[in-house]
Image (cartoon, coloured by chain):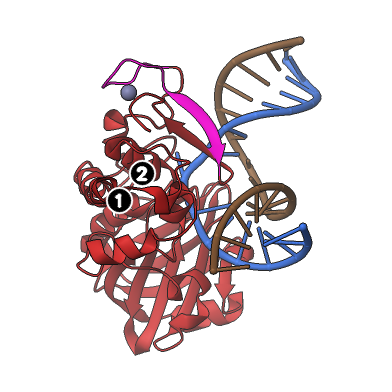
Chain colours: A red, B brown, C blue
Amino acid sequence: MPELPEVETIKESLKQKIVFKKIQDAEILCPKLIKFPEPAGFIKSIKNKKIKSLERRGKYLIAKLSSHYNLIIHLGMTGQLIYINSDSHPVVDKHTHLFFNFDDKAQLQYNDVRKFGAIWLVKDGSLRFVPGLSQLGPEPLSEDFSLEYFQELLNKKSIIKYVLLNQKNLAGLGNIYVDEILFRAGIYPERNAQDLSLSERKKLYHAIREVLREAIKARGTSVVNYIDGEGRKGDFQKYLKVYKRVGRPCYKCKTLIKRMVLAGRGTYFCPKCQV
DNA sequence: CCCTCTACCTGTCAGC
DNA sequence: TGCTGACAGGTAGAGG
Ligand SMILES: [Zn+2]
């Protein structure tokens, strides 16, 4: 489900609802999703903590809590955060694996069909114990992600799709947006990074930022089951140019979109527009 | 370091 | 109707 634009949308939709609320208690229904600490310690430590802020880094959500605690959530493929306000009756279904009760009787549920998500509760200064988070590359929409930095990333003999998917290079891109970005830049997904010309590198750099900005504006892509914290779907699936469009005509040139497997992932591209 | 493959899970859909 | 296999937004770890 969630790449940078979806996680950003979830963060924004939940922010106004949960920041400044106090967590009265929590219940864990699927312990394997809690990576740290062990379930009993998790429940004990999170009780009576106030949510001070909600942030995003790559595909991770970070809730800063009182007493220097940080609740870190990665949604995996199918994770959802569902906010249920105080006048509705919360319903726990078979894919609800964790929920928090707030002091005003509202509830926040974590649902996840495939259970690839991961949750940590760590104190400030221990964020390095969250494996992927501490190794993330720069945020693609920040100033840290400069053209110069990007040029350096490309000076290796790796397949370009692989470079863009690697979270250590760049935080937040996933399979959908990488395919869409490569289409926009007119680059064949299996090209070698170091073979890209200067103009292709620039085109790619701008495509990354444009596609992400547009996807955030559309509040993300709902392929199967993505919804934000208010249960709303995104709109960006209406604007996808190649992802999941195998056998259908390219919007630019009418050539049929093709699919191949790269880095173990379905990869969609236009054989004529992407060279 | 680079890359590929596998595992982790559950659900859906096409084909027989 | 089954059954089977391919395919799904994710990352991590083993091994070449
Ligand atoms: Zn085309």
Q: Secondary structure at mark 1?
A: helix
At x 51%, y 82%, the residue is A44
What is the chain identity of the residue bearing mark 1?
Answer: A
Tags 2 and 1 in contact by the CB under 8 Å rule? Answer: yes
Q: Position of residue A126 (x, y in %)?
A: 46, 86
The overriding secondary structure of the stretch rendered in magenta is loop
Towards the viewer: A71 or A273: A273
What is the chain identity of the residue bearing mark 2?
Answer: A
A124 relative position to A139: left or right? right
Towards the viewer: A145 or A211: A145
Q: Is residue A85 above or below residue A218?
A: below
Q: Could you tell me the amino acid type at mark 2?
A: Tyr
| Ligand 1 visible in quadrant | top left
Residue A116 appears in the rendering: yes
For disc 2, the marked residue is A177
Q: Is residue B16 above or below residue A125?
A: above
Q: CA distance from mark 2 to mark 1?
A: 9 Å
Q: Could you tell me the amino acid type at mark 1?
A: Pro
For disc 1, the marked residue is A5
A10 relative position to A165: left or right? left
Residue A254 drawn in magenta: yes
* Occupied quadrant, residue A183: top left
